[in-house]
Amino acid sequence: MAPLALLARGGALSVLQLRRRESKGVPHGWPDSVHPVLQQIYAARGVLEPGQVEHRLARMLSPQLLGGMAQAVELLVEAIRDDWSILIAGDYDCDGATGTAVAVRGLRLLGAKRVGYAIPNRFAHGYGLSPAFVASLQPTPQLIVTVDNGVASIAGVAAAKARGIRVIVTDHHLPGEQLPACDAMVNPNLAGDPFPSKMLAGVGVMFYLLLALRARMYEEGAFGETKPDLSSLLDLVALGTVADLVPLDFNNRVLVEAGLQRMRSGRACAGITALVEVGKRSVATLCSSDLGFAVGPRLNAAGRLEDMRLGVECLLSDDVAQARRYAEQLDAINRERRDLQASMVAEAEVMAAGLGHIDAVGVALYEPSWHAGVVGLVASKLKERLHRPVIAFAPAGEDDTEHLRGSARSIPGFHIRDALAAIDARQPGLIERFGGHAMAAGLSLKTSDYARFATAFDAVARELIDAERLQAVLYTDGELPPGAATLALARQLRGAGPWGQAFPEPLFDNLFECAGWKLMGERHLRLQLRDPRDGALHDAVMFNAYHGQPPPARLRAAYELAINDWQGREAPRLLLRHIEPG
């Protein structure tokens, strides 16, 4: 295994392996206006004809295909008709916050008059609809609708039912062996659910429920001739979908593209517009990466360090000045989060190297001073640098040092939730609670059981991961032809997405000569790269890449063809993601 320092993404001398994506068929039927390079990029992602990138809302999957929809709609129709008090039980991440805002806004549009929301406190209530969270709800609602949680809330649903509360669970997480005894459940990942796409985020599931509810109420004559416009919620759906890193299959791309178009046209809600502005992004040219790297983290920061109600209030506000104040608060919290994350990641790197975790296949890390809201980011950073599944733990609360909360991130080919289930089956009681997806999961356990868990996690990882999967691989779309790095192609690539999880942004790799370089700040590089094939010079930039050594005189670079917008002037620029001696 190479030294840890050489595994950092962005480092000048990484052991990353570059591989080129292969076409999954022959492109056909494309108009001449679509650049041949873009056609090949699409083909490498299984998109072979124009119809597969026609992201029109009319091509969305039908809400009626989702299981459990009839029962959930029936209960909501009754609740709106009889003026029940409805409480949306959200989650403290971006998906949960946007889903909560979609639920509150959407139900109000459809005529519900008494709709409120509550977000659990990470330290006081734990995750999801827990008994402690249910006990905190005052006054008692008549109906709880969960968003982005609930499929594992067996005890919490039972506690709600004991108080006479009806419960609808909307979720997208994978179910365990037992389901909660709720009144209705909508989750595309339930066994046998007929919905063709299993990739909906929590906010997407909630949006689909509102669509089905509107259709049913319209059939019953609730709105006259004009249906309430639920497309006004698509900006929130797009943000939550991108931020939750769910795979962007065709249906999710339809939702995200519709939301992005709404934002670009100036019709986003005041909160999203304010978050875009404090993130120093352009509304007019917004793309999915802006949502993932600028908007989502600022919203997520509230749930990690403070109270996600601040984020939800930002998304629910229709007052521009108020939304801006909320966004500025969220921006300040995010700066605090970045500082805390940097110190925790530095400690984790030292810990991984010093304790010999470099040789572990499944890496577990714990530090009593760590913040439970940030351990997921630590796990993600260490996973990238070690290219191993990583679980980072912190104390469950300031006053609870007897229990740990862990956040797990995985590598392709290792289903992290299934791995936790395997440990749970072999050593019942070791893990107190767990849940999640293939690539990310959360869990809790006793502090005294940490060492035993770390051993068990490494053992199951060794059993299920072959040596080849431990080699970090960066897939590219091959060489960009001479003369192709133009502003026109860069614009076409930017508008061709939405790019994201499982539909990656185009990445090229070419050999270059370094014709010049200089530092930007202390760690960023600005380079002049010469293409030896035609002598053309290209501006390039690489962030967090300087470690005291100049870049190689000849190098192979993996890069995005991006647009540098400076003082209103646009020019193509290579955004380097990886370089190695050529």
Image (cartoon, helix red, strand yellow):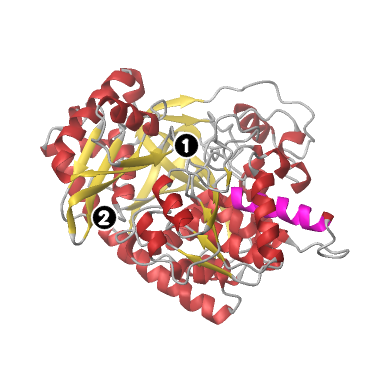
Three-letter residue code for mark 2: Ala
Q: How many marks?
A: 2
Instruction: Say whether residue 206 is magenta.
Output: yes
Quadrant position of residue 452:
top left
Q: Main secondary structure of the magenta part?
A: helix
The C terminus lies in which quarter of the figure? top left
Percent across and percent down for residue 357 are 17, 33
Q: Which of the pair 436/488 is nearer the observer?
A: 436
The stretch drawn in magenta includes residue 423: no
2 or 1: tag closer to the N-terminus: 1
Give the vertical position of 16 relative to 541 (above or below). above
Q: Secondary structure at mark 1?
A: loop
Nearer-the-camera pick, 119 or 250: 119
4 sits left or right of 162 in the view: left
Residue 133 in which image quadrant: bottom left
Q: Is residue 489 visible?
A: no
Q: Is residue 101 left or right of residue 11?
A: right
- Tag 2 residue: 342
Q: Mark 2 falls on what kind of element?
A: helix
| Image quarter in which the N terminus is found | top left
* Residue 131 visible in the snapshot: yes
Which residue is painted at 77% across and 32% down in the image? 30
Q: Which mark is residue 175?
A: 1
Tell me if 450 is positioned left or right of 520 in this view: left
On residue 381, which mark appears?
A: none
Question: Which region shows up in magenta?
Answer: 205-218
